[in-house]
Image: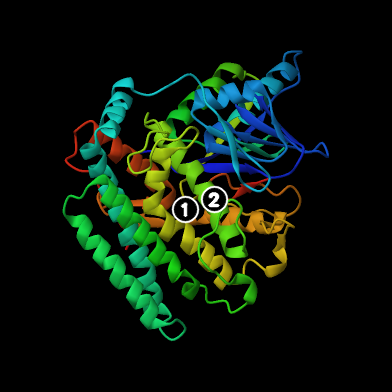
């Protein structure tokens, strides 16, 4: 079984990454050096103006480390890959099934069912823990709608219908999401999901955590030899990692959203950590970003029991397990794709 | 698992300095330097075999000494640090620079 390894995040501007032997050497703008052996890492994420030597890029590609470049604010720019790897036959099978609407619908149904169930579980847990502080009726109503979605997903439905249900579920869920924000500070009010750019603090946090999630899911998919761009639920679009977005759906609510909620509700992020630009876009400062990264890394080490394997794994490995299960399903070793249900 | 590697290399013959440099290079590839000739290395059994093999090829049985301390999987509670030069935990710390 794969081991959950650490990810190195470089946020200091002007850093230079190079390779020395088997190590990643990080040289800061002040000239300080730190080194990390490659075998303790499974990814490097660079934010903003971070330089990287070509030899390190090659080494990372060879050792299977994912190396991504993001803007300072966390928008995805590029990633480095070695020669095309993985099994061609698996990838071809993926394309074939993505082209066939019925086959695609079967995977998409699993993914959306996972998403709906997990969103519902998040709302339910909130009702259970904070019934005195939230509008129970509203949240209960949303849970009811999600129940309906889940019921309809139990029988085979067409791809368009699945997309419709996914939209309905997402709207319902984000419709009551502001109830889950217990902090009564005005600054953390939430009025629906806005992105590109995020217009309030909560959306800013959500967008950033989703980017981190996308990085991890994408590298997990690539590690098993699937093509992260060809999705089943998401339509193909140049540069869009469709399959990574598909697989993220299962994880968004309980992994990303709950992380954001607990950061806000526990007061780990503060209002003054966010700035609003003239365009209305909201950005967070370096310290807030570091808080989020630390929390994210910590969350990935939490252990959960995998619903399908009934085995205890750290959450960070769940992406790899799901990617492998999907590959097995595409190879027809499994009868259906088992999504990740969070309890 | 965590292995603590420490070494003493004799400078009596002119090759000593060469061996010292080589040994420290190998150790740097697998772990972090916590003191001048002490390394903490988090390795899996396969990596450990390769690592040990490299060291064995370089050191001089007659003049140098190598010591390995196996601290196992739950090594965090077996290590305590005081003073300067705080080390990072490669498994659990968030590595943010």
Q: Secondary structure at mark 2?
A: loop
Neighbour class for label 1 at 10 Å: few (<14), some, many (≥20)? some
Asked which colour scheme the image uses, the reply is rainbow
Chain under disc 1: A
State the residue at coordinates (72%, 61%): A275
Kindly indicate the quadrant of the structure image that contains residue A188. bottom right
Residue placed under numbered mark 1 in the picture: A301
Do discs 1 and 2 share a chain?
A: no
Q: Position of residue A150 (x, y in %)?
A: 25, 61
- Name the image quarter holding the N terminus of chain A: top left
Q: Secondary structure at mark 1?
A: helix
Q: Position of residue B34 (x, y in %)?
A: 68, 41
Q: Which mark is residue A120?
A: none
Q: Given the current orientation, which residue lies at the most extreme top position?
A: B14
Between circles 1 and 2, the one closer to the viewer is 1
Where B34 falls versus B81 (above or below)?
above
> Can I make out residue A97 in this image?
yes
Where B80 falls versus B54 (above or below)?
below
CB under 8 Å between callouts 1 and 2?
Answer: yes
- Name the image quarter holding the C terminus of chain A: bottom left
Q: Which mark is residue B92?
A: 2
């Amino acid at each position: 079984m794969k081991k959950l390894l650490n990810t190195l995040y470089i946020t200091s501007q002007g850093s230079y990454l190079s390779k020395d032997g088997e190590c990643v050497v990080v040289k800061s703008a002040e000239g300080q050096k730190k080194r990390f052996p490659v075998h303790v890492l499974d990814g490097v994420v660079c934010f903003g103006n971070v330089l990287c030597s070509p030899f390190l890029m090659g080494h990372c590609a060879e050792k299977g480390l994912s190396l991504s470049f993001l803007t300072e604010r966390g928008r995805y720019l590029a990633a480095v890959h070695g020669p095309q790897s993985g099994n061609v036959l698996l990838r071809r099978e993926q394309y074939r099934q993505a082209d066939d609407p019925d086959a695609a619908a079967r995977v998409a149904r699993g993914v959306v069912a996972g998403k709906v169930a997990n969103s519902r579980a998040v709302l339910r847990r909130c009702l259970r823990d904070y019934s005195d502080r939230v509008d129970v009726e509203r949240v209960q109503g949303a849970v009811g709608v999600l129940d309906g979605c889940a019921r309809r997903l139990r029988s085979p439905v067409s791809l368009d219908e699945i997309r419709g249900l996914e939209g309905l579920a997402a709207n319902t869920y984000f419709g009551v999401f502001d109830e889950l924000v217990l902090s009564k500070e005005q600054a953390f009010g939430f009025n629906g999901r806005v992105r590109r750019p995020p217009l309030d603090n909560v959306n800013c946090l959500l967008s950033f955590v989703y980017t981190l999630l996308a990085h991890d899911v994408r590298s997990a998919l690539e590690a098993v030899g699937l093509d992260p761009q060809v999705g089943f639920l998401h339509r193909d679009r140049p540069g869009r990692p469709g399959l990574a977005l598909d697989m993220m759906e299962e994880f968004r609510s309980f992994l990303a959203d709950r992380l954001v909620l607990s950061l806000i509700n526990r007061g780990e992020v503060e209002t003054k950590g966010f700035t609003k630009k003239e365009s209305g876009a909201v950005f967070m400062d370096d310290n807030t970003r570091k808080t989020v990264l630390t929390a994210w890394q910590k969350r990935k080490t939490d252990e959960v029991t995998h619903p399908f394997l009934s085995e205890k794994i750290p959450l960070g490995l769940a992406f790899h397990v799901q990617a492998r299960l999907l590959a097995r399903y595409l190879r027809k070793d499994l009868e259906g794709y088992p999504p990740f249900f969070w309890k | 698992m965590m292995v603590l590697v420490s070494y003493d290399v004799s400078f009596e013959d002119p090759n000593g300095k060469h061996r010292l440099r080589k040994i420290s290079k190998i150790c740097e590839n697998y772990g972090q330097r916590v003191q001048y000739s002490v390394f903490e290395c988090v390795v899996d059994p396969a990596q450990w075999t390769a690592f040990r093999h490299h060291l064995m090829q370089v050191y001089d049985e007659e003049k140098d000494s190598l010591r390995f301390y196996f601290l196992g999987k739950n090594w965090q509670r077996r290590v305590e640090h005081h003073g300067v030069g705080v080390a990072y935990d490669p498994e659990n710390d968030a590595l943010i620079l």
